[in-house]
Image (cartoon, helix red, strand yellow):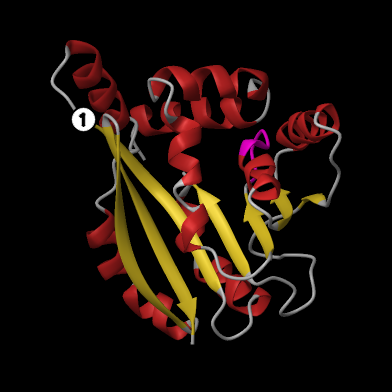
Amino acid sequence: MSVWWRLVRFGFRLLYNDLAWTYDLVANVVSLGQWWSWQRTALPWLAGERVLELAHGTGHLQADLAAGGFAPAGVDLSPAMGRLARARLRRQGAAWPLVRADVRRLPFRAGAFDSLVSTFPAEFIVHPATLAEAARMLPRGGRFVCVPNAILRGMSPLVRFLEWLYRVTGQRVNVMELRDQTAARIASAGFTSRVETVQLPGSTATVVVLEKV
């Protein structure tokens, strides 16, 4: 691995752990204020009521899930993210399970959720163990909904700079290409897949919907 990619990975580890308190500010800046709207594009594709968020981060989507009538729970490996998310829920007078766990070894019974959701995850999301655990969590017809990408539209210098920044830090995956590369894993885990695009003012979000067969 090159020195550049080592530095990028180190920077993301800091952002998710020691510097987690800056995460919301960074997300807001690099998305031009659209990060939370991008996250919410996952909501219409969820099935059922019980929803587990993989890598819940600072808890914004947890609050949106509850407001949308879902019964949410969340897991995240970062203790700093767990503290921030719990503090957010307490401020809103809400409480439900937020667990520190590796998504490849989830501490829940089989079939415990109707849907899983993850927004802007790292490469762990297509790991065979993650897909196997996702399948274990869901009943037939359950969905695993992921928002891997959202792209800013426009030709302003700021938009072009931010899109360059996403590319050089490895955040601009080709979703269709990635799906093709992982199609065998997805199928062997017991899922069908489809890719949806959602147009928002000034940006386009991509939603991947896996459904358990």
Q: Is residue 29 above or below residue 188?
A: above
Q: Residue at x 61, y 31 (%)?
A: 16
Q: Position of residue 17 (x, y in %)?
A: 67, 29
- Residue 170, by quadrant, is top left
Direction left: furthest residue? 155
Horizontal placement of 158 versus 212: left or right?
left
- Residue 175 percent location from the top left of the image: 28, 55
Look at label 1 and name its amino acid. Answer: Arg
Q: Secondary structure at mark 1?
A: loop
User: Which residue in the structure is indicated by mark 1?
Assistant: 153
Where residue 49 sits in the image (x, y, percent)?
68, 66
Q: Quadrant of the N terminus?
A: top left
How many marks are shown on the rendered structure? 1
Identify the residue at horizontal 26%, vertical 29% (top origin): 202
Q: Please name the predominant secondary structure of the magenta segment in the image.
A: loop
x, y percentage for residue 178? 29, 60
Q: Which residues are magenta?
A: 56-60
